[in-house]
């Protein structure tokens, strides 16, 4: 199980990036009632059978790790949501893409803590690959949208330590007190 | 901190570029790669990545160090894992690299160019 909500978001978004997606869109909507997340991609997608098997922790498609027998990302997520009394939905079509949508109720003691949002956004935006990523955030400090290509251009790439420090300052400012 | 605009971010980058004397780093770059598989994330790799960014910049090495994420390195039992590739030094995979150890990693391996003995797990065994 993951420690915080942001860990689930990162894990699911990593799946989306690794599905050879050209574009990944992440919605993070935090309200007094719930924390809602939607991760959509235009990658490989899954058949109905593959989608059902993706929820089995003792199944993996073998593309990432040839001899491995487990795939824990989605099963972890579903287990945590069901414990907390939240909701989830996965829509996928082979060759078209996948959309994973889930919500944790804020009132449930079994909902994980949100975690550090700037730290999550930094990791999301720096997931390796040449895909585009759009993150739409609606939270206690208002709303904003991040576009990976735009930020990469602004800070001079998403790999060098000095660029990542600038990006982190920017992300912290978006979630700041003013 | 007041909300920054994208334009302010671009301006800040230009200012920083003017402030620092860029060293010739071509071919001398150090790579720090954080394992961000499900196992790594569960062990706190997100915070480790964040701490690497902070520690590298605090050490004044932001321009010389490339910080990347990768998937599981096959060492799930000692997550979070961090691989360091530094010219003139052996490539090492460190385990149990929680955020509180990252400062020591940067100080020892990147600055003093010494290995952090207690955390070395070498290259991973064949994937399980």
Image: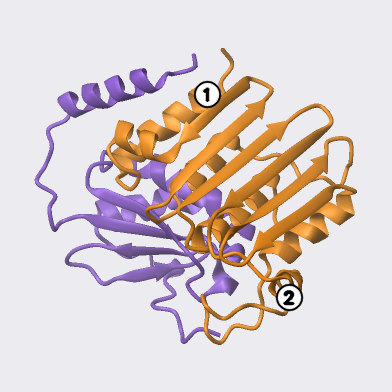
Chain colours: A orange, B purple
Q: Which residue is tagged 1?
A: A174
Q: Is residue B59 visible?
A: no
Q: Position of residue B90 (x, y in %)?
A: 26, 72
Letter of the chain that mark 1 sits on in the rendering: A
Residue B114 or residue A42, whichever sits in front: A42
Compare marks 1 and 2 and give the one earlier in the sequence: 2
**Badge 1 and badge 2 both on one subunit:** yes
Q: Is residue B68 visible?
A: yes
Residue B93 falls in image quadrant: bottom left
Alpha-carbon span between mark 1 and mark 2: 41 Å
Residue A67 falls in image quadrant: bottom right
Q: Are marks 1 and 2 in contact (CB under 8 Å)?
A: no
Q: Specify the quadrant that holds the N terminus of chain A.
A: bottom right
Residue at horizontal 74 percent and vertical 41 percent from the top: A113
Q: Specify the quadrant that holds the C terminus of chain A.
A: top right
Left or right? Give the position of A41 relative to A23. Answer: right
């Amino acid at each position: 199980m993951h420690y915080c909500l942001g860990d689930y978001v990162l894990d699911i978004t990593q799946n989306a990036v690794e599905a050879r997606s050209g574009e990944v869109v992440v919605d993070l909507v935090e309200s007094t009632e719930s924390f809602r997340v939607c991760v959509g991609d235009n990658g490989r997608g899954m058949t109905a059978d593959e989608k059902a098997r993706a929820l089995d922790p003792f199944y993996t498609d073998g593309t990432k790790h040839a001899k491995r027998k487990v795939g824990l990302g989605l099963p972890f997520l579903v287990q945590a949501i069901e414990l907390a009394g939240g909701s989830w939905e996965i829509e996928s079509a082979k060759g078209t893409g996948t959309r994973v949508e889930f919500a944790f109720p804020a009132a449930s003691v079994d909902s994980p803590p949100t975690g550090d949002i700037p730290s999550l956004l930094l990791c999301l935006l720096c997931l390796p690959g040449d895909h585009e990523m759009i993150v739409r955030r609606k939270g206690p400090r208002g709303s904003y949208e991040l576009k990976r290509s735009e930020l990469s251009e602004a800070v001079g790439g998403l790999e060098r330590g000095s660029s990542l420090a600038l990006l982190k300052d920017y992300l912290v400012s978006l979630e700041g007190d003013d | 901190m007041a909300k920054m605009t994208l334009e302010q971010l671009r301006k800040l980058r230009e200012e920083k570029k003017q402030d620092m004397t860029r060293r010739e780093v071509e071919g001398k770059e150090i790579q720090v790669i954080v394992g961000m598989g499900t196992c790594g994330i569960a062990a706190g790799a997100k915070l480790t990545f964040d701490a690497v960014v902070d520690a590298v910049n605090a050490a004044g090495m932001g321009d010389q160090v490339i910080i990347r994420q990768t998937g599981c390195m096959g060492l799930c039992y000692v997550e979070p894992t961090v691989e360091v590739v530094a010219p003139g030094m052996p490539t090492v995979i460190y385990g149990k690299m929680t955020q509180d150890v990252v400062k020591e990693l940067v100080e020892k391996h990147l600055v003093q160019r010494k290995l952090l003995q207690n955390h070395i797990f070498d290259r991973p065994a064949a994937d399980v």
